[in-house]
Amino acid sequence: MARTGLFNLEKHFAFYGAYHSNPINIAIHTLFVWPIFFSALLILYFVPPFFNIPNFEFSLFGYDVALVWNPGFAIAFVYSVSYARLDLKAGSLAALLCIICWVASCFVAGLLGFCLAWKVVLVIQLVCWTGQFIGHGVFEKRAPALFHNLVQALIMAPFFVLLEVLMSLSGSEGFHSIVREKFEADIKAWQENKQQLLS
């Protein structure tokens, strides 16, 4: 049964797809979106936890890892639940990737410490955001989706690029063909509006 409202995958994918139809721009986002998500969790590791709950500690590759129940965990959890609600199969995979990013961010943060971690985060964020803006300005020739709907763009971005990869690997056109008409209509309307403004 198709979901409606907040958890309507077709609606969200069509919105995001309308801003990402150029193959080079899609490839740039595929490379850069998940590192942005990971590095955001990495810096959030150093934010104090919400509640006085003991950290979950374990050893990984001979290093001690402390999973901290802070805003990084909250964001990973919200993204995970949202993706699983949008689509059980692909969403569950995206949710697993979110949790892996959170655990990995805790591991890397423990290794680097704050003084080095924020520099790593800064470089990742600058490189990845710059790459995406180049993708939009040079190849897509359309402003990023976040200028239209910041929350929807930021939440959908990791799931969108994962869906693109899954569809290209499976060779399935089913879901993509369903939403293609929607985002092509959006692109056409945007181009017509842009033409009217220029004339």
Image (tube, rainbow, N blue to C red):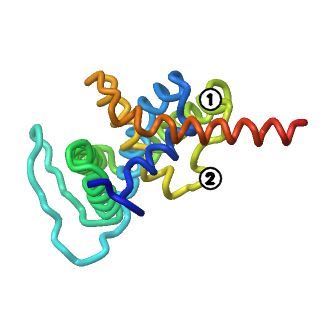
Of the image marks 2 and 1, the number of the one nearer the N terminus: 1
Q: Quadrant of residue 136?
A: top right
Q: Nearer the viewer, residue 3 or 115?
A: 3
Q: Is residue 23 left or right of residue 190?
A: left
Which class describes the residues within 10 Å of circle 2: few (<14), some (14-19), or many (20+)?
Answer: few
**Residue at 53 percent of width and 34 percent of height:** 20
Q: Is residue 21 left or right of residue 69?
A: right
Distance of label 2 from label 1 (alpha carbons)? 15 Å
Which numbered disc covers residue 172?
none
Residue 42 spot, x, y in % from top left: 36, 50
Element class at badge 2: loop
**Above-or-below relation of 74 to 65:** below
**Above-or-below relation of 46 to 119:** below
Q: Which residue is mark 2?
A: 148
Element class at badge 1: helix
Q: Nearer the viewer, residue 31 or 90?
A: 90
Quadrant where the N terminus is found in the figure: bottom left
**Residue at 9 percent of width and 47 percent of height:** 59
Q: Is residue 188 left or right of residue 194?
A: left
Residue 81 spot, x, y in % from top left: 27, 59
Residue 57 spot, x, y in % from top left: 12, 58
Q: Amino acid at mark 2?
A: His
Which class describes the residues within 10 Å of circle 1: few (<14), some (14-19), or many (20+)?
Answer: some
Q: Which residue is mark 1?
A: 140
Q: Is residue 95 visible?
A: no
Residue 3 spot, x, y in % from top left: 33, 57
Q: Is residue 128 visible?
A: yes
Q: Amino acid at mark 1?
A: Glu
